[in-house]
Image (spheres, rainbow, N blue to C red):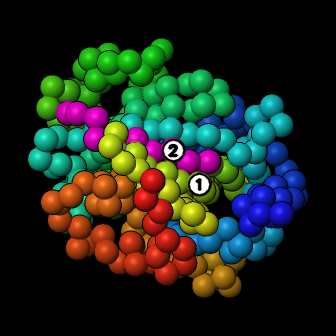
Amino acid sequence: MSDYIYNMYKLESVLDKFNIISLQDTNSVSLQNRFDTKYITTEDKIVNVLNRVCNHFFILTIDGNKIFNYRSTYFDTDDYSMYYAHHRGMLNRQKVRCRRYETTGDVFLEVKRKTNRGNTIKSRLRVDTDDEILSIGTEFIDKYSVYKPDDLKNVIDTGFKRITLVSKDMLSRITIDKDVQMLNGESGITLPNIVVIEFKRGRGYINKVFSDALRHEKIFPMRFSKYCMGVSLLKEGLKRNNFLPGIRRINKISYVNYV
């Protein structure tokens, strides 16, 4: 049995311990205005975390499935102004992306804004197709973004598998992403054995069960953006020194695989 199949077996076994929640009920905890904390770990450690929190969270389940495929296309300007705003750690920065939920077929154009208070505000527009999406969403981008649609271009595509948990008090969500890949049309990377955790909640909310589980596995917060990681590794000539701690962390617990 390969390591990948064995890890999937362990993961799927622990997911069966969770009570399930529907997409409709999950959407009631949408947290479009929220505070985010990210963590990077391995597949073995996430199984241990899930074993510790399974009695305190629901798991999103659709048609019996608990792991879902996501794809995103990120847009930026010719001079990569969104990338550099993140690289400099600027507040009031933005990302513009198209997200495809492959299980349901839903497609959204999204603008994510990080404010000077540290919270994330996400606005999104449901669309019927992702063909020429910047043209479809011109009014939406003009309303929610400081960027003009004509100044944006497709920079990178990402794909991953996601698990979504909802706390039983219905006040927070956790997303767990694995099998992450980034492509820029010319080359790509995968992150074997890397798991990206994002804890989403309102201001001041603490989930002690979750935080204790992370601390027990020595998993600590770390800045991480799939978009910025992909661009920094695939686009030559851009500054990336502020992203090097994340790259070193990934290579310490696994490795970046160029494809």
| 167 in the magenta segment | no
Q: Which residue is mark 1?
A: 179
Quarter of the view holding residue 42? bottom right
Q: Say if 89 sits above or below 114 in the image.
A: below
Q: CA distance from mark 1 to mark 2?
A: 8 Å
- The magenta stretch spans which residues? 152-161
* Whether label 1 touches label 2, CB < 8 Å: yes
Quarter of the view holding residue 151? top left
Asked if residue 58 can be seen in this view, the reply is: yes
What type is the residue that disc 2 sits on?
Gly
| Left or right of residue 160: residue 80 | left
Dominant SS type (magenta): strand
Provide the secondary structure element on which disc 2 rests: strand
Q: Say if 54 sits above or below 187 in the image.
A: below
Q: Position of residue 227 (x, y in %)?
A: 36, 52
Q: Say if 37 sits above or below 45 in the image.
A: above
Q: Residue at x 66, y 82 (%)?
A: 217
Query: Between disc 1 and disc 2, whose residue precedes?
Result: 2
Q: Residue at x 78, y 58 (%)?
A: 5
Q: Residue at x 47, y 62 (%)?
A: 257
Image quarter (top left, top right, bottom left or bottom right) of the N terminus: bottom right
Instruction: State the residue in front, 131 or 257.
Output: 257
Mark 1 surroundings: few (<14), some (14-19) or many (≥20) residues within 10 A? some
| Left or right of residue 7: residue 96 | left
Q: Which residue is mark 2?
A: 159
Q: Position of residue 70 (x, y in %)?
A: 56, 40
| Left or right of residue 97: residue 34 | right
